[in-house]
Image: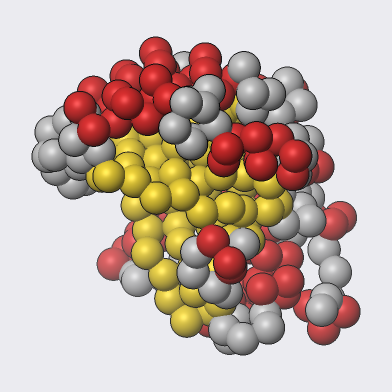
């Protein structure tokens, strides 16, 4: 079944990022899996020197558009604006974050769902999150080029793709690609490969022809992110938030 994802950029308040990611993984994922058939692809902390801070990136996997609709229907049933069973969870979350920006994203056919990624042992010491902007209506062409040009070149550097996604509910002008880099030395090699004459020169040359603008920031797994632990977070993983620094 084709998947659909919720991609979230979350602004964390002060020094609460550790508490927030635990609240999001251990305290949310088990209920979301049972009540909404929603799986966690990842909960990552943005490396502040490369992007916004303090920020967390969440991605949630659902069974296609029907699964997303069922999720929304559960949230808004009976005209409510919030699932009452989550009132306490939301109250705690609100004390840890100030807001954020969400996108609905659709994966390319070759993007693997989270259970396949975990089974294959895909994991990064660090992750590269790339947001591409192209002319309206052309994000599909950009993602075709990611699969045909970028993916084999990047794989030759020892980097695995977590996924490539078209931003939905918009004008087909944005795409997101996430790469898993096994160690920091590989990240250095990846960055140097973008230099003139580097291993990624064919990809760099292709991007202007696609009308693409892009930027990259780095992320690291939260302690209970599925790609880090190889599974979905469980109730048994829970700890009191006041014990988390």
Camera-side residue of 24 and 86: 24
Residue 180 drawn at (x, y percent): 64, 36
Q: Residue at x 51, y 27 (%)?
A: 198
Q: Quadrant of the C terminus?
A: bottom right
The answer to whether 32 appears left or right of 11 in the picture is right
The answer to whether 177 appears left or right of 41 in the picture is left
Quadrant of the image occupied by residue 38:
top right
Q: Residue at x 30, y 24 (%)?
A: 206
Residue 209 drawn at (x, y percent): 20, 27
Is there any visible trace of residue 64 in the rendered image? no
Camera-side residue of 233 and 215: 215
Q: Residue at x 75, y 39 (%)?
A: 185
The answer to whether 107 appears left or right of 245 in the picture is left
Q: Residue at x 17, y 30 (%)?
A: 138
Quadrant of the image occupied by residue 16:
bottom right
Residue 4 drawn at (x, y percent): 40, 35
Residue 9 drawn at (x, y percent): 46, 62
Quadrant of the image occupied by residue 23:
bottom right
Q: Residue lying furthest front in this view? A: 197
């Amino acid at each position: 079944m084709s998947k659909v994802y919720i991609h979230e950029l979350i602004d964390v308040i002060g020094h609460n990022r550790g508490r927030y990611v635990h609240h999001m993984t251990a305290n949310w994922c088990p209920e979301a899996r049972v009540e909404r058939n929603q799986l966690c692809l990842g909960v990552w902390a943005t490396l502040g020197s490369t992007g916004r801070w303090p920020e967390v990136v969440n991605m949630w996997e659902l069974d296609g558009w029907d699964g997303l609709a069922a999720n929304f229907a559960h949230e808004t049933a009976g005209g409510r604006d919030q699932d009452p069973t989550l009132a306490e969870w939301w109250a705690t979350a609100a004390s840890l974050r100030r807001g954020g920006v969400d996108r609905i994203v659709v994966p390319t056919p070759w993007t693997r769902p989270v259970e396949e990624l975990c089974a294959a042992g895909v994991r990064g010491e660090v992750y590269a999150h790339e947001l591409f902007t192209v002319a309206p209506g052309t994000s599909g062409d950009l993602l075709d080029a990611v699969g045909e040009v970028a993916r084999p070149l990047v794989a030759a550097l020892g980097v695995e793709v977590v996924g490539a996604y078209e931003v939905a509910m918009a004008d087909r002008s944005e795409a997101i690609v996430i790469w898993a880099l096994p160690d920091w030395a590989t990240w250095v090699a990846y960055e140097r490969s973008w230099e003139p004459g580097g291993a990624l020169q064919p990809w760099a040359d292709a991007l202007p022809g696609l009308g693409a603008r892009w930027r990259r920031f780095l992320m690291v797994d939260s302690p209970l992110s599925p790609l880090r632990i190889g599974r979905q977070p469980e109730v048994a993983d829970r700890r009191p938030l006041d014990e988390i620094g």
